[in-house]
Structure formats: structure tokens, C-alpha cells
Amino acid sequence: MSTPTDTTALKVKYALGGVAIGIALSTAAVYAHFFSLNEAQMSTQTQLKSDMEVLDTQNKTLQLELEAKSKSAHTANTSVDELKTQLEESQAQTAQQAEQLKALKQQYKQVQQLQAQQAKKLTSNQAELVALQQKSTQQKQVLEQSKQFFQSQLTLQHKQVELNKERAKLIPILNKLVQQCQLFNEGKSWDAKSDACDRKQKASDKLKRIDEQIDANQKKVVAIDSTTDMLGL
């Protein structure tokens, strides 16, 4: 049979056992809760780490894109500046070419004017050349004519001299034949020959022809002199 002390001890033992069990259960619950919280935190941390890595990756990607865009913008600005510089150079070159074109047009205009003057001068020179050629031809013709005229004049003068000589010789003979013919016709001289009158007539006809030739040649000489005077020879 148990005593009150044993009962109390047993109660205390049971109580302590219950406490211990409670403590154990509580501890288990706490550990379970802790492990549950820890797992949740770890999952959250893992998720956060993953999210942070994603964000970091996105951030780096954005940074790279930003740098690329910045470089692109810088390149674009540089390209714009280069294009602006090229445009300014092109405009300056265009202005220079415009000035050169203006100068070339002025030179072309001057060349055209010079060509027109030269063409006019050439036309004038050609006209003068034609006139000189005509004058030269005329002078050649005149010289040829003058040569012919002088030659004809010399020939006529020579003929005139010869005819005058022949006439001078013929006149005494004709005069003598006239006397003989007259004496023969009058019968006053036996020395007069019967053909004296015939020879007198022949001499007279010859003298007449000589005089006619002299007159004709003299007219030709006068005509030649008039022509040479008219031509200025």
C-alpha cells in the first residue's frame, strides 16, 4: 500500500513527465515551426537571390543596351557632325565650283567674242585676199596686155620705120618715072622707055599702099597709147 508521499512523488513524476513531454512537444513544434520558417526563408532567399540575379542580369542587359544606345547616340552624333562637316565641305566645294563655273562661263564668253572677232577678221581678210587675188589677176592681165601692147607698139614702130624708109626711097623713083612717062607721052625724048608709065603707076600704087599701111599703123599706135594711158601703164 502506497503512502501519500509516494503518491505525491508519483504525481510529481507524472507531472514532470507531462511537462517534459509538453516541453518535448513544444520543442518539436518550435523546431518544426523553425524548420518550416527556415525553409520558407530559404525558399524566399533562393527566390530573392534568383530574382536578384535576374534583376542583375536585366540590369546588366539594360546597362549594356544603355551603353550601346549611348555609343550609338554618340556614333549618331559623330555621324551627324561628320555629315554636317561633309555638307559644309560640299557646300564650300559647290560654291567654289560655282565660282569656277562662273569664271569658265566668262572665259567661254570671251572666247566666243574673240572667235566672233577672229571670224569677222577672217572674213575681212578673205575678202581682202579675194580682192588682192583679183587685183593680182588683173595686174597679171594688165602686165600681159601691156607686154603685148609694148611688143605690138615696138613692132608697129619698126614697121613704120621700114615703111618710111621704103617710102623715102620710092618717092625719088616715082618722081623720075613721072617725068619719063610725061616725056614719053609728049614724045619729047627718045630716052624715055615705053614702060615708064606702067612703072610709074606701079610705083604710085606701091606708095599709096605704103601710105595706107603707115596710116593704119599710126592709128594702132595711137590706140595702144590711149589704152596704156587708160590702164595706167
Image (cartoon, grey):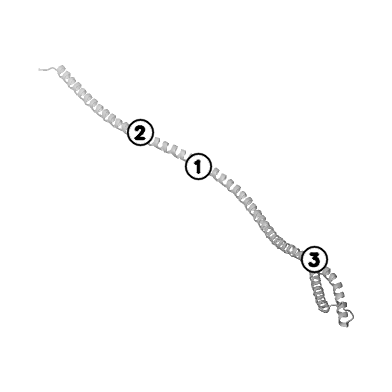
What distance separates the C-alpha of mark 1 from that of mark 2?
A: 37 Å
Q: Nearer the viewer, residue 22 or 148?
A: 148
Q: In this rendering, does residue 229 appear at all?
A: no
Query: Of callouts 3 and 1, which one flags the residue occurring earlier in the amino acid sequence?
Result: 1
Residue 54 place in picture, x, y as percent: 35, 35
Residue 80 place in picture, x, y as percent: 51, 43
Q: Nearer the viewer, residue 80 or 197?
A: 197
Query: Of callouts 1 and 2, which one flags the residue occurring earlier in the amino acid sequence?
Result: 2
Give the number of the mark in front: 2 or 3: 3
Residue 79's tag is: 1
Q: Amino acid at mark 2?
A: Glu
Residue 158's tag is: 3
- Farthest residue, direction left: 1
Residue 213's tag is: none
Query: Of callouts 2 and 3, which one flags the residue occurring earlier in the amino acid sequence?
Result: 2
Considering the image in quadrants, where does the N terminus appear?
A: top left
Q: How many residues crowd mark 2 within 10 Å: few (<14), some (14–19), many (20+)?
A: few
Give the number of the mark in front: 3 or 1: 3
SS for callout 3 = helix
Up/down of 97 relative to 123, above or below: above
Give the number of the mark in front: 1 or 2: 1
Picture quarter containing residue 224?
bottom right
Taking the spot 21% from the left edge, 22% from the top edge, the residue there is 20
Up/down of 198 relative to 53, above or below: below
- Farthest residue, direction front: 190
Q: Amino acid at mark 3?
A: His
State left or right for residue 54 relative to residue 194. left
Taking the spot 25% from the left edge, 26% from the top edge, the residue there is 31
Residue 53's tag is: 2
State left or right for residue 27 relative to residue 113. left
Considering the image in quadrants, where does the C terminus appear?
A: bottom right
Residue 173 place in picture, x, y as percent: 85, 73
